[in-house]
Amino acid sequence: MSVMSLVSYEEALASYDPVMGLEVHVELGTKTKMFCGCSTELGADPNSQTCPTCLGLPGSLPVVNAVGVESAVRIGLALNCEIAEWCRFARKNYFYPDMPKNFQTSQYDEPIAFNGYLDVQLEDGEVFRVEIERAHMEEDTGKSTHVGGATGRIHGAEYSLLDYNRAGIPLIEIVTKPIEGAGHRAPEVAKAYVAELRELIRALGVSEARMDKGQMRCDVNLSLRPNGTSTFGTRSETKNVNSLRSVERAARFEIQRHATVLTDGGTIVQETRHFHEDDGTTTAGRIKDNAEDYRYFPEPDLVPVAPAREWVEELRASLPELPRVRRARLQAEWGLSDKDMQSVLNAGAVEPISETIAAGAPADQARKWWMGELARRANETGTELSEQPITPAQVARVCALVAEGKLNDKLARQVIEGVLAGEGEPDDVVAGRGLAVVSDDSALGAAVDQAIADNPDVAAKIRDGKVQAVGALVGAVMKTTRGQADAARVKDLILERLAA
Amino acid sequence: MTELIKYTAAETAAAIAKGEVTAVEVARAHLDRIDAVDKKVNAFLHVDHEGALAAARAVDAKRASGAELGPLAGVPLALKDVFTTRGMPTTCGSKILEGWVPPYDATLTKRLKDADVVILGKTNMDEFAMGSSTENSAYGPTGNPWDLTRIPGGSGGGSAAALAAFEAPLAIGTDTGGSIRQPGAVTGTVGVKPTYGSVSRYGLVAFSSSLDQGGPCARTVLDTALLHEAIAGHDPLDSTSIDAPVPDVVAAARTRDVRGMRIGVVKEFAGEGYQAGVMQRFEESVALLRELGAEVVEVSCPSFTLALPAYYLIAPSEASSNLARFDAMRYGLRVGDDGTRSAEQVTALTREAGFGPEVKRRIILGTYALSSGYYDAYYGSAQKVRTLISRDFDAAFAGVDVLVSPTTPTTAFPIGERADDPMAMYLADLCTIPSNLAGNAAMSLPCGLAPEDNLPVGLQIIAPAMADDRLYRVGGAVEAALNDKWGHALLEEAPAL
């Protein structure tokens, strides 16, 4: 379907009410895989991190990773879920070449966590509650690379390469209940939910949750129903949407696509869809009717997981401050408006700013640097703010030099540049570039006298009481001192000299 | 040298330890016997001449160095081809694994090596342990050394036949529905299915994960106990492995005293389908136990009649999932990969060629039983029956120490007789299946020959979970009394083959 023939988003929403379901897979950052002792480190040579168990060799058996279970329980608790007193793993039987056993060890009707919610804050500050159906443990599959086809998919490929390093990496699948009532904000809710979940996972320290590295993957299930009705329509399942922006775009596109089909009197096919980053559209995957049968049954090679209540309570008590609570606290501490706080969040600046403050900088200064100079640079280079080659401690040191009067704003900017350019610590840059502020009266006196002599008209105005004209003379002094003069002191000296 | 093959494992180990014979001589004698008779018996799928002799040489060197030898050091063993062996083929009796050489040892294999047992090779079996006659092997049937035209039982017919043919004094089997005990019964040898979870399944190629259990086989109760001791015990690589001490089965085998023990005869294991000579020898064994001072009572386990149908839902269901990995992608057979076919087509062609009819039958049965809409009626109901059977055992064991029954309703039947009648074949496991469903321990030991066909009859002894020692106490006493009565062991001399 071409984008041109789609009904507009506004038209779609005028007739239809979207219902969404979001399924997020999170790869846990455990040292070893879910059911064997192989490393989970990314980037190793293909098939170098495998053993009989994660290769599914005949005779091999799984053993549950206790840290994986603990991470699942902590995620469940952070999502306000109930934690199962007793649950089992189940085999999900289906065929795919990158799945070593041709069944995935997962959980079916006995998830470890269920019935929770996550409150997400939208851009205007409104809080939307997303209900959580379940969070369950499972293992990742291997990775296929299909070579030689036009689509990069298995059909039409000349051959496929299989890497089982990923096979058996622990996954937590978090499934929402149907998200209703979001209306035209459904795409925004989807994005905000995934963003909030990502923050939560990172705060728990159970995964880096990097969507670009596949550590967090989102499926967007979406259906439309005519406004004012309550029965769900047929859904599509857009798989592996791998950035926050894409989550929003995929939901938006599917709303328009569904509306277009329904408006034309067509029916929605229950199918998986592939999202395309380049043009923001989706295309059909495989048909997914309800007859698809995974023949689940309890995994006989594993014993049930029964998290002791005291242990669950210990984990609950030791949960870190959760993102929403922390954000509210920081906003108050930093004295920011909702709008300013939202900009900080959108820039990914919460961590750098708070670490800079922890290193001794005043809140406004820390925010000024990270949201100004550094955010601009991150934007220009298309990198994360946290990845800039400068540490919060270094930013804090620059702030301290300014507070001590050793740097002015302009010089501080040059120091930051120097650090980013790899010239060392801020003090090294100051020394190396000779950037110290000159506030010594004898050193400045000559420059001030020269400026007054060079600009008699301006000097006359100041003598006549037009004090605001002093800026021009200060500027002249700064120019001759190549910006290193203490501007406040220069202004005082000029006024002293012209006071008579 | 051929004399060396007639000794028990305990005698052989003692002779090696004393220096009366070397482990290499013992290994050679058994390899010579295999070379001489196994073309007829077909007990072995793979004989590892070099590996066995190297292991034997290592035992002799260890002794020469003055190091202490374990109770089975230097004793040869026949390993069922369902346990992985690093560097040695493992086929499970299937074409689909032809040529596969595992890169790792099963925990059981490792323990045998650690005990300095000499592994002679891998034994024939029904494909993926599915069968009761070894006729389902893709590599041809094994003959019963008592009569080579008859079946040696299954699935572990190769291991049992190797013992009865004196090709090895020790063997390993696996028992999912009777695959150790029924071959033991029809070949006049001893076999034990230990408590589920007491012998590691790591490296045991799964048929039905919740039922499979490796176990020891030998010609005497004491040898079986020595092997049981060597292979049992907790394994962190198997989540279903029991973390508790193994009962002292060797001491129990030496007790030979059943005075004061209470023994239950299961009422349901008799009647139609039971051969007269089998029942006769069984009843004589019960009488013998009374003479030896045991108290014998009849017990009823009404749910046992449901065991066979429940088993044929649970085992195929698990098998349909366990065998899904044989897809031609990573190891074993690959058929039709000519560059024009899809992965799915290659998998289908490989399975068509690589799996035998019984394996296909059970995969289809299990796939159906697990299907959405049928799960509750089939798999779900079968699991409920399993609970009922466990309760019957619990009730019975509240009143008795062990239960006894014939191991199998008939003696060895002719090869080919039941090949086209799966239901008749499945009945061979009628008496053995309940213990697999409940996970308790059971033994089969010879109790004589049926008068009508002069073929061995097995006596089954069943003990509660983790009371495996009771099997050996009762079995050891029965064996000693019968040997006294006969003036010799049932299998004293190697048969002429």
Image (spheres, coloured by chain):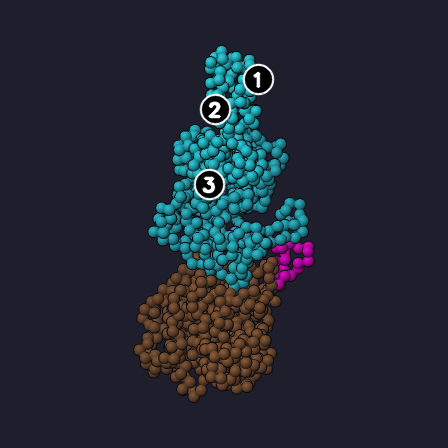
Chain colours: A cyan, B brown
Residue lying at 45% horizontally and 55% vertically, measured from the top left: A65
The picture places residue B397, in percent across and down from the top left corner, at 34, 69
What residue is at 59 percent from the left and 32 percent from the top?
Answer: A6
Circle 1: element type: helix
Tell me the kind of residue under disc 2.
Answer: Arg
Q: Are marks 2 and 1 in contact (CB under 8 Å)?
A: no
Chain where mark 3 sits: A
Marks 2/3: CA–CA distance: 46 Å
Numbered disc 2: what chain? A
Contact (Cβ within 8 Å) of mark 2 with mark 3:
no
Badge 1 sits on which subunit?
A
Q: Quadrant of the N terminus of chain A?
A: top right
Q: Is residue A347 above or below residue B166?
A: above
For residue B279, side relative to residue A239 (left or right): left
Q: Which of the 4 quarters of the picture holds residue A200?
A: top left
Query: Identity of the amino acid at label 3?
Result: Glu
Q: Quadrant of residue B475?
A: bottom left
Magenta range is B333-351
Residue with the mark numbered 3: A199
Residue named by callout 1? A454
Q: Disc 2 designates what residue?
A: A489
Q: Looking at this view, is B351 or A63 the one in front?
A: A63
Disc with the residue nearer the chain's start (3 vs 1)? 3
